[in-house]
Image (spheres, rainbow, N blue to C red):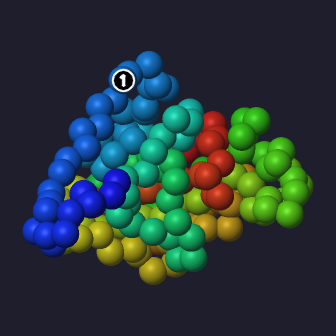
């Protein structure tokens, strides 16, 4: 876009808009692609649930970032512990063609058996107890190494809503058990 060639400065600038419309036909996004669609896992009793971050997106400046790291294709869950105590949250068996580090070159030097391929996750609280608040990462809750299996054990407060953000490490898209 260029300014109009005119000797008067007032004619060389102005405002404009460029409308962008989703033409559709793209991949179907997961229902928990954004925080507002976070899946409640409170009543899952020590069972494994199949999950995926395939076709997920990450809002520009909308998802918290991992330390160190970034989010590219995140999905959201939340958990409300019934009582205060120690809880272990884990994921396992991260797999899929785009998950196992099949791209092995100078940009992605990770063989499929090494850390660096897989997913990363962290737990957050919200200042308003919903998605509109400011998120605070729980200390020691993040796993951002891209491991294929991982878990954290934390002391959680009964009745407090905890948001769980899961993302593909280096943009990987994976199926996993949660």
Q: Is 51 left, or right, of 10 in this rendering? A: right
Local SS, label 1: loop
For image coordinates 49% across by 26% down, the residue present is 27
Furthest residue in direction bottom, as rendered: 139
- Above or below, 74 against 20 in this view is below
For image coordinates 25% across by 44% down, the residue present is 18
In the picture, the quarter occupied by the N terminus is bottom left
**Residue under circle 1?**
23
Furthest residue in direction front, as rendered: 7
- Above or below, 19 against 11 in this view is above
Q: Position of residue 91 (x, y in %)?
A: 60, 50
Q: Where is residue 93 in the image (x, y as percent from the top left)?
A: 71, 43
In the picture, the quarter occupied by the C terminus is top right
Characterize the local packing of mark 1: few (<14), some (14-19) or many (20 or more) Cα atoms within 10 angstroms. Answer: few
For image coordinates 86% across by 63% down, the residue present is 106
Furthest residue in direction top, as rendered: 25
For image coordinates 63% across by 37% down, the residue present is 175
Q: Position of residue 128 (x, y in %)?
A: 14, 65
């Amino acid at each position: 876009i260029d300014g109009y060639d005119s000797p008067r400065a007032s004619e060389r600038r102005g405002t404009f808009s460029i409308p962008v419309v989703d033409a559709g036909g793209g991949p179907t996004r997961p229902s928990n692609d954004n925080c507002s669609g976070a899946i409640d896992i409170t009543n899952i009793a020590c069972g494994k649930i199949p999950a995926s971050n395939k076709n997920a997106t990450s809002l520009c400046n909308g998802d918290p970032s991992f330390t160190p790291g970034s989010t590219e294709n995140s999905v959201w869950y939340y958990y409300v512990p019934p009582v205060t105590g120690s809880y272990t949250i884990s994921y396992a068996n991260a797999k899929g063609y785009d998950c196992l580090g099949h791209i092995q070159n100078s940009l992605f030097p990770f063989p499929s058996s090494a850390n660096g391929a897989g997913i990363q996750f962290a737990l957050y609280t919200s200042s308003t107890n919903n998605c509109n608040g400011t998120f605070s990462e729980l200390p020691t809750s993040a796993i951002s190494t891209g491991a294929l299996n991982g878990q954290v054990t934390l002391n959680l407060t009964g009745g407090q809503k905890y948001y769980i953000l899961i993302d593909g490490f280096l943009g990987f898209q994976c199926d996993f058990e949660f």
